[in-house]
Amino acid sequence: MIVADYSEQTLQGLIAGSGLRFGVGPFTLNLQSSLQQLAGDVRLMYASYPISSQPFADFHVRLDRPFGLRRWFRPQVNFTQDTRTPFKPLPLEQSFAMFEWGLNWCISSQCHQYLIIHAAVVERGGLALIMPAPPGSGKSTLCAGLVARGWRLLTDELALVSLEQPGEVIALPRPVSLKNESIDVIRAFAPEQVIGPIARDTAKGTVAHMAAPVESVERAAEAALSSLLVFPQYTPASATVIAPRQKAASFMELADQSFNFNVLGELGFQALRQVLDSCDCYDLSYSQLDDVIPALERLIDARAESAQLDSLDLRSTGIG
Amino acid sequence: MWASVSWFVDPANPVFFGVWPGENTVVAYQSTSGDTHMISAMGAAVLELLQTGPLSVEAIFAELFPDDALEVTALNHLRNNFLIHFEQLGLIKKTLS
């Protein structure tokens, strides 16, 4: 059973009551809220996510309007996990964005069974392309563009690196966060994609989310081997330029973009080292999705081909 | 005076390396402090030697360059640009022997 199997009215009842419990990648989420409009947003953006009958949920989260006089002239929303309220209230029309940001906070601050890196990850042919980047680099736009052209979405924000399987990235397909001009860029590039509610005047400007494709959600249990590490930078009017970069410098950058590298100690170091062991590293400058996507497809397909040849070599020598 | 000084990596605070073929820089991670450094391949070779136990600057030079004669300029370079720098970073300790 999936979220979309429930009517909006039923979802409203669940969310207002004991909670809507559903699976998001490796996690189970229990969502409660007194906000009527949230059920419709969740039904639109999480339509294909599996309903969970597990008695345990990793995160119990709530979104509610705070009490006080302000609720009458400037309605706001609060995010709560268990008894914690980690953020100041936001305007009510930013409810869905706050849900997404709150869930990011839950995962990045508590899930230390993974090395968590601020990066988008997409997969093609079993190989993962990791794109770490600071805000404004065009990471999410590129991620959305790749996903719209058939790459599998593993994550747009939080790369979960396995501490057990060397170089593996765990899938956490969730809506892709688009900001400002990116929203219209993706609307024009991939009009068939589902874009959720618009949140204006946020700290990041105007924000909207693109729903994860059904196939990505259905394959959420499949990890992917990290194979390409690309540091994207959107540069207006730039041609697509892909240049190799050193792994040691890439390691330092990834450690810097990690939420819990220091928390994990040696485990985190080894997990990150294994990611670099299995990846080719590049800097990428781009301005046009129509140019950059085929270039990345060629790069990862060449990588898949060379991996196949390596595997044949090993078999012919009797090692594999 | 310098001959009586040795340096070593504290066994309670080992250094782990990220080394990749064809690259002249290495990542060094110190487990106890959690500090991560990008160092030269030469620096990594020095640290690896000092994980085996305390060594003087002359002994390090002899291990790294067995075919070369000891030379003051080279010893000073090794001491000032590697050993003292690593000591300041907390990667190695000094002992008097």
Image (tube, coloured by chain):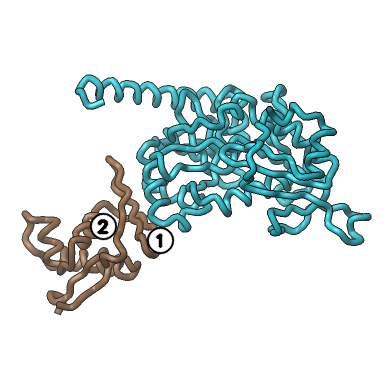
In the picture shown, does residue A216 fall above or below A263?
A: above
The secondary structure type at the circle numbered 2 is helix
For residue A175, side relative to residue A34 (left or right):
left
The location of residue A187, given as percent across then percent down, is 72, 28
Kindly identify the residue that appears in the image at 49 percent across and 47 percent down: A114
Residue under disc 2 on the same chain as residue under disc 1: yes
| Spatial separation of the CA atoms under disc 2 and disc 1 | 18 Å
Chain coloured cyan in the rendered structure: A
Q: Amino acid at mark 1?
A: Gly
Q: Percent position (x, y) of residue A196?
A: 75, 34
Q: Chain of mark 1?
A: B
Compare residues A193 and A245 and report the one nearer the observer: A193
Chain rendered brown: B
For label 2, the crowd category at 10 Å Cα-Cα, with few meaning under 14, some 14 to 19 and many 20 or more, is: some
The subunit letter for the residue under badge 2 reads: B
Of residues A216 and A54, the one nearer the viewer is A54
The image quadrant that residue A174 belongs to is top right
Classify residue A263 as left or right of residue A4: left
Q: Which residue is mark 2?
A: B43
